[in-house]
Amino acid sequence: MKSVLPILIRKELTQFRRNKVLPRLLIMMPLMLVLIMPLVTQMDVKNVSVVVIDKDRSSLSMRMESHLTHSDYFRMDESAADYDEAVRLLDQGHVDIIVSIPQHFERDMQSGHAKPILLVANAVNATKGAQGMQYAMQTIASAVQELATERGLSTFDLEQSGLSTNRLITVQNRYNPTSNYRHFMLPALMIILLLLVCCFLPLLNIMTEKEHGTIEQINVTPVGRLEFMLAKLIPYWLMALVLLAFAMLLAWAVYGLVPAGHSALIFLGAFLFALCMSGFAVSIANISNTMQQAIFVMFFFVMQFMLMSGLFTPVDSMPVWAQALTYLFPPRYIIHIMRAVYLKGALLSDLWFDFTMLAVLATAFNILATITYKKQN
Amino acid sequence: MANDMSTFVSFIKKECTHIFRDVRTMLIVLLMPVVLMMLFGFAISTEINNINVAAVVDRYTPEVRRDLTALEQNPYITMRGVIRENEVDGCLRSGDCAAVVMFDAQGRRNIVLDASNSSLSASAGSYVQSILNRGQQMPLPVTTYMRHNPQLKSAYNFVPGVIGLIFILICAMMTCVSVVREKETGTMEVLLVSPIKPFYIVLAKMVPYFIVSMINLATILILSDLVLDMPISGNLPTLLTLCTLYIILSLVLGLFVSTMAQSQMVALLICAMVMMIPMIMLSGMMFPVENLPPVLKQLTYIVPARWFNDAIRKVMVEGLGLTAIWKEFLILAVMAVGLFATSIMKFNDRLE
Amino acid sequence: MTNDQSPIISVRDLTKQFGSFTAVDHISFDVYRGEIFGFLGANGAGKTTAMRMLCGLSYPTSGTGTIVGFDVRTQGEQIKRHIGYMSQRFSLYEDLTVAENMALYGGIYGMSGETVGKRIDEQLTQLRFLEHKNDLVGSLPLGWKQKLAFMVATIHLPELVFLDEPTGGVDPITRRQFWDLIRTTAKEGTTIFVTTHYMDEAEYCDRITMMVDGTIRALDTPANLRRHYAQITNRPYDEMTMEQVFYTLARDAMRGD
């Protein structure tokens, strides 16, 4: 018997064309993800508001203040007469860091008996507080070093004491010489795009058929399970790849980001990933009764995937049990592949484990999808 | 009058039965906050807890061995072993190691970092450096104090975010899909020709989600206190008032979006694209608002979650009271009322 | 070689249980080729559940059945090749056109593109609907949707067609037209298995059964049933309607209206 697949696929494409919302949405999504998200997903801390209470008024303390003023990270919009006022400003959110330099600091530093400078950070946002604190310390330290160098003083020698120049340490940054966080995020954002498209669209498609009852008319025909599944999946695989290409073009056009490695690897990985996630989506659709139910179950999983797969936080930093779980998450592998190929020029041989796991999971999920589809109850 | 009231109550009962009967969804709705809290509390961390390091050694000297031992013994570093120079590239590219320490013949050390993750690699690099530089004192006398969060618990940061996210998800999205579902299946028309006013129909729809959200709020607060060690410092009444207002606002938001969608699929997509993603991105929940470019910063003023986020941080972490958050409170209230009025109007429109 | 005299549907003690609820309770009957076989009963009597088992949409809990020579429990997919189906709830694609829906199902049943095209025109002409060939189905009024569903069910000229409440919700004239359509199709040799809760439609059928609470309470030609129950209730034959037959039968019924 001739295969019915082409007819079914044509029907899917016709329905897609006629849909008023979907095509527009699919164009908007890459635009939003590639153009706007990178502007938002900043982990760096900037524009930290700092206030200095300088009871010393020495050349050292003023040099510190000057370094803080001229730093890119800090802004000094507020002033406080005393420490208590500064703390009030901090609590109200007008100020992020307080630098309080005690009286006679410079004089006491030279004799080695200085009362310490007090740095207070608003740590409600722990990351921001810690980073701000670190920058403050570095800025102050650089001020001290500068002054020391000018005066030829060795007391403040910040060179690692006891070590000869032979034990110098140099640091080399590879793969991202400009340290551009955007370049790190963009491949991940493309994955988000694929994830959303491949997880939700097939799910919504099948649930709509279930809720409208059209799936019953199909179930009473000789259309095979595999054919029906494939007809539902193949258009979305294609859509995913096209959207990916679109996103990659945008990334190049707007940010000048070009894959360091072979694009073919990227598309292969994306294809396997699309297979995984769409198979997963169909499985969920098959066991759900209503659209609301399906949406919520899928949302639950998508959230786990997005949080635990290394998109925003490193997988290596998670406890062992959590890392073990992620071996079952397809996004973990594709994120690794995308970043490695895009930024590091990784080869297939570098990534064989990820590709293999994606292939395994793709097979597993699609078998699950076919098994869970029941034409007869 | 009494008749109306009892009709209203029976509507509420119907809606509740609908929802609570769907065990699977209920399970997820009630478990999601728990799972999120656990994840954020125990699994996810923006700090680096493990750095994979490899070494290239030209000549083994006592200093080199001491360095290697220091690296091996460090709990935050996993030594991947000693490799050859030509393997460095492959090691970094495949992600097997995040840094390679190269000891040359003169004992100089070069740290090669995988800088593709720029923020992490800087921290990783400086950490490895600090280990190699162990034994040095910090020459500058400085005392640091992290106010409000001396132990730098990241819970303080994300718990408010999780609360906001959960409410938006459950209240807005679920209400929206629920209302649109009735539209789609045509049962909405039956309701609309009944003697009960549309206002009450809509209200009845929101009640079960309100109940569920309150349960979730309680869950989050209890977990936060017992498991994540983040006590609610003071002001419980203010916290509850603020959260209740936000829940109501989210419900109304869901209602508003439902007036714009004709099918469940479209409703979901609009909710996700127009509501959730901007909420997550522009509210300060995950990413700081200060760093946004001016255009986006302006946009955040109309994102309800942003005001909620500001307010709830002040209340939960700093223990401030209603007077400190009056501005945010007012804005949220105005938004809620405005959206509700608009939705009811749109509802009534469709009747004609 | 199928013997033309052997039943096209043969069912023995067919049962469907949902947990503790027995929807269909040990029903047995035969349907012969070329018949219009009516399955009457109130809403909730179990008609649709029974039909879904016959179509291969639902597994029987117990009992046996043979449809067009294939076993209902193990050969569902083969059954589907030889039957057409029209569900109670409209189940065609509202965002496709009339022609697109018909072409889809024609193709699914293995008809070639050319054959399908001809068949579509043929059916549409027969129903005087040709000018709406390219209209979106969602824009059609209910009566036409039902007719379209019937066309789709018969597009591949199956031996056996299942119709579940085909005339639900349409006006009396459209109902009449529909039954004309059904009878024409039956005359061409197709066996029709139809469920309905409109008792007057029984007259159009060759034989009917009455289902009450999941069991078959009567199985005969409409005329015989009326005669028999006229006798029992001491009424003149001319005044005995199918509705009255049903009321007599269903007096003790527990389910349905």
Image (cartoon, coloured by chain):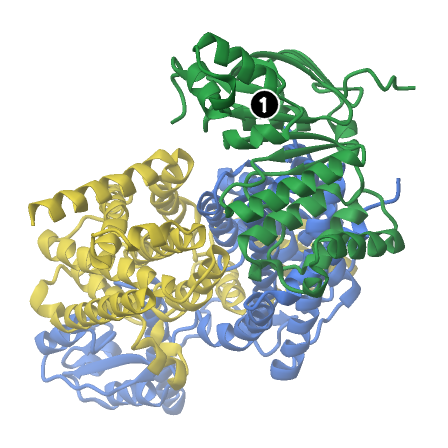
The chain displayed yellow equals B
Image quarter where the N terminus of chain A lies is top right
Q: Is residue B111 visible?
A: no
Residue assigned mark 1 = C50
Residue A86 against residue C145 in the figure, above or below: below
Task: Classify 10 Å Cα crowding around label 1: few (below 14), some (14-19), many (20 and above).
Answer: many
Image quarter where the C terminus of chain A lies is top right
* Picture coordinates of residue C134, whole percent (x, y): 70, 65
Q: Secondary structure at mark 1?
A: helix
* Picture coordinates of residue A237, whole percent (x, y): 70, 56
The chain displayed blue equals A
Chain letter of disc 1? C
**Image side of residue A284 versus residue B246, left or right:** right
* Picture coordinates of residue B185, whole percent (x, y): 44, 50
State the residue in front, B318 or B57: B318
Query: Residue at coordinates 7% horizontally, 45% vertically from top-left?
Result: B2
